Amino acid sequence: MDPRRGKATRTASKAGAAAPKAQGVKGPPTEPSEPPATLGAAGPKAQKCGGVGAPGSGRKKRAPGSPERPPVRARNACAKKAPLGAEDVVEGLAVPAGKLAPPASPGPSLPRTGSRRERGARAPLEQRTLPEPTEVSRLALGLGLGPLVPASRLRQKGAAPGAWKPRTVLEKLKLRRQEISEAAEIVNRVVDHLQRRLQSCESEFQGVSRLCTGSYYERVKISAPNEFDIMFKLEVPRIQLEEYCNSGAYYFVKFKRNPKGNPLIQFVEDEILSASKMLFKFRKIIKEEIKNIQGIDVILEKKKRGSPAVTLLIRKPKEISVDIILALESKSSWPASTQEGMPISQWLGTKVKTNLRRQPFYLVPKHAKEGNGFQEETWRLSFSHIEKDLLKSHGHSKTCCETDGIKCCRKDCLKLMKYLLEQLKVKFRHRKELEKFCSYHVKTAFFHVCTRDPQDSQWDTRDLELCFDKCVTYFLECLKTEQLKHYFIPGFNLFSRDQIDKINKEFLSQQIEYERKNGFPVFYEF
């Protein structure tokens, strides 16, 4: 042994013994400031058509709550091992367990990194620095500067790996095969029973049929199969639409002729098909009929003001929420407000767009916002069946994500975006700022990113972190500019101030920026 080397080693050992014990104290990242929450005041009785109230009118201020500081995970910390999952969710609810593909094998488990105290004592300061946010240039936003650069490539040499791993998070979100089969069987029994009742001779809804929509059927459901959207569609021929206050999305429905044999004539008031009366009768039938479902404990949840859904809560044998929505089916041409919508010509092709526009459109009894209240007789356009088709054939290539086709990460990005919003809503469940945000906002923004980046090569599975970041970037831009165009009705802004207050959009923007800067700790918190 080199005597000089041995001397240096002994000197270092003495220095290490003399050093005080490390406390492992991390400097926490700066928590974004939280604006005070505002609550909309209850409005007066809605008139048939009224102007939108001034932004912020009638709001009650409340003292801001203490910001909850999320714990920052160490850079090699791993999430709990995810259960086996199955992406093989077939169309409809009935899923024979024997025909499902075996669950995907879990990814390699990450090495144990020790306790929080041990990690803090061992890790040098430069390795405990939080990851920089992904830098996405203005070119990604279509504004014309440099190329996209993922955050992982911007970190200094020698820095620890990122605090979050998208594949690990996605593994956690996979649905279990057994849970899918059990939930499908329960929901089928409830829905089949209600459908038979609605189709009975004495029912005004005897022409209804089922249309399955929502994230479960789009194969982008995350975490657990505990929420289902079922649409009962009712064809109404020869109707005339009268647009409500140039909204593009809300309409009054009139019949061109009112034959005496039309069972819906009892819901017509001043020549208008009353959405409130029809929804009330629909809800009443379901409320009475769920008492007759044997072997399943199901109750009707309290009606949410302005919501078109009749929400059932199945409590036993499993807790499952089912939104049942009445929809009018029209096979006439789509309204003029949709003419410039669904911009998929460069993404999925002109032929696909033409074929989709030949499908029927639907109207659901959704009340339009009117000042501080609602116009309760309006119907809103719905294209949930088209959204399901877009996600089903989501690639520019006809074989995208098929067995022998090229795989893309579009759906993975959408799942991560939905999970981000879901986790933030759980984290701030005692506050009001995030109440009006929903997964539909995330899905709409995602469709716009798919339009902007139509090529499959722009969604390579190897670039998942980068692709997710461009989705986050676009959503943040929508929040900051208060502009999120409805994908099918471009004149309807989902982020206008009469839909969501500016202060709420600023709050969500700050929380997403914080998560992005610090490696999305919220993905591992709940």
Image: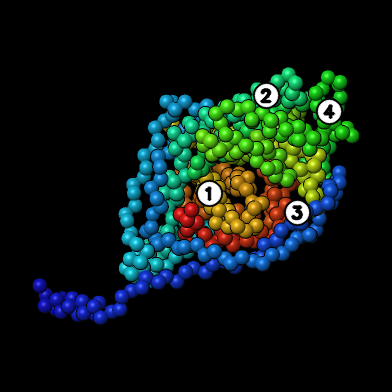
Q: Which residue is mark 4?
A: 266
C-alpha gap between disc 1 and disc 3 = 26 Å
Element type at mark 3: loop
Question: Is residue 314 something that shows in the picture?
Answer: yes
The amino acid type found where label 1 is placed reads: Tyr
| Mark sitting on residue 498 | 3
Element type at mark 4: helix
C-alpha gap between disc 4 and disc 1 = 44 Å
Q: Which residue is mark 1?
A: 419
Residue 526 locus on image (x, y percent): 48, 53
The amino acid type found where label 3 is placed reads: Asp
Q: Which residue is mark 2?
A: 197
The amino acid type found where label 4 is placed reads: Gln
C-alpha gap between disc 4 and disc 3 = 33 Å
Dot 2: within a 10 Å radius of its alpha carbon, few (fewer than 14), some, or many (20 or more) residues? Answer: some
Q: Earlier in the sequence, mark 1 or mark 2?
A: 2
Element type at mark 1: helix
Q: Earlier in the sequence, mark 3 or mark 2?
A: 2
C-alpha gap between disc 3 and disc 2 = 39 Å
Q: Residue furthest right?
A: 270
The amino acid type found where label 2 is placed reads: Arg
Instruction: Kindly indicate the quadrant of the structure image that contains residue 514.
Output: bottom right
